[in-house]
Image (tube, rainbow, N blue to C red):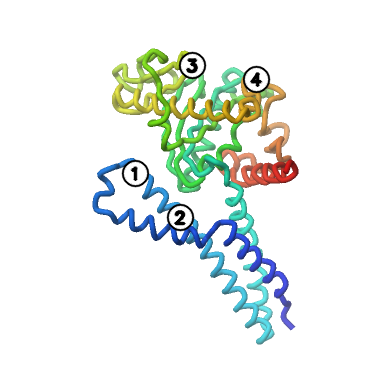
Amino acid sequence: MAVSHADELAVQRQRVAQLEADLDIAGKRDRLGELEELAAEPGLWDDPDRARRVTTELSRVENELKRFDRLANRIDDLEVLEQLAQEEDDAGSADEVTTGLKELSAELDRLEVVTMLSGEHDSSDAIVSVHAGEGGVDAMDWAHMLQRMYLRWAESRGYEAEVYDQSWGEEAGLKSTTFEVRGPDAYGWLSVEHGVHRLVRISPFDSQARRQTSFALVDVVPVLPEVEEDVQVPDEDIRVDVYRSSGPGGQSVNTTDSAVRITHLPTGIVVSCQNEKSQHQNKAVALRVLKVKLAELERQKRDDELEELRGGAQNVGFGSQIRSYVQHPYQMVKDLRSDYETGKVTQVLDGELDELMEAELRRRVRETAEQE
């Protein structure tokens, strides 16, 4: 007699039903109809900002529904295949059910994580800044590696990413960089990356090939649609500096002084942009990034969570890291909050971050549940 999977199929069916409720699939289907009507309006693009919000939400809801529907159809197919395996005593079909259940369970695990992204701004786009910390040239190289890791991660998820500013080191790497990641729940995912990241390796910049420990700070803030209207930045509160954009090793990117650096005098926040074609465009982008950072600062103050959310980030060195990446004397990435670890250092640095992110999201949910 072929092996029965009835009990496990019932468990997975229940998980699908719970997800349908948690994700409010019925509400999303109603919302999809509303968004399709809005997207079909002849004058939609008369207001480009509103049009982008509508089309972005439409794409997100469509993708969420398609993903859920694939799972629901998959459980239906497996139940039919299970019935066939039992009626025909077909071991081959039973093996297909076994394989299918493993794949379905893994996909449900991933989709259940999405239900954890229910914070106030989790669905927003994100602005990410990476700053080199202790470690000299190695730390600047580490900041560059982190930028690449996040850009590769964004690409793998189909997210858009735009680099606004890169301050290159004299010898190698980046002193700092700022970029925006746009996509469904971008901030929710990337918010777990906020903090100090530590790298241990044999330094490629040390002639004696000694082991070096380097640090970099990753700062993540949400992009809120209402920020540009709600956050006012008086001219007297900012200093605008114009300079020539530069690439690695000090090479000039533009032949004109078009890069813009804005310093917010009351808070000391500094933002820069050098990737746009004109000084005017660079200033507009830098001002937008500044408003996003100011909005996040105010939100943190309002919620009395500044120290907790920033995690004491002023100390970018020993004892302050959230995650360690070790390339020597062994291979390991370990998140010090969730205790999740993996030996796939190369893959993680190539952007395979989902398992690390999911582990921290699950830890946060457990911690919240324990506090309630």
Residue at disc 4, secondary structure: loop
Q: Are marks 1 and 3 in contact (CB under 8 Å)?
A: no
Which badge, 1 or 2, comes first in the chain's sequence?
A: 1
> What amino acid type should be assigned to the residue bearing mark 3?
Glu
Upstream in the sequence, badge 1 or badge 4? 1
Tell me the amino acid under the disc marked 2. Val
* Tag 3–tag 2 contact (CB < 8 Å): no
Residue type, label 1: Arg
Q: Which mark is residue 50?
A: 1
SS under mark 1:
helix
Q: CA distance from mark 1 to mark 4?
A: 40 Å
Judging by the rendered image, the residue that carries numbered circle 2 is 61
Q: Label 4: how many residues lie within 10 Å, few (<14), some (14-19) or many (20+)?
A: some
Which residue does the image show at 46% across and 32% down from the upper left? 179
Whole-percent x and y of residue 153? 52, 42
Sequence order check, earlier mark of 3 and 2 = 2
Screen quadrant of the C terminus: top right
Give the CA separation, mark 1 to mark 2: 17 Å
Q: Earlier in the sequence, mark 4 or mark 3?
A: 3
Q: Disc 4 designates what residue?
A: 315
Looking at the rendered structure, the kind of residue marked 4 is: Asn
Q: Is residue 176 left or right of residue 315?
A: left
| Discs 4, 3 touching: Cβ within 8 Å | no
Instruction: Answer yes or no: is residue 331 visible.
Output: no
In the rendered image, residue 366, in percent from the top left (x then y), is placed at: 71, 45
The N terminus, quarter of image: bottom right
Q: Nearer the viewer, mark 1 or mark 3?
A: 1
Q: Which numbered disc flags the more N-terminal residue, 1 or 3?
A: 1
Q: Residue furthest bottom?
A: 88
In this view, the mark in front (1 or 2): 1
Residue 95 drawn above or below residue 64: below
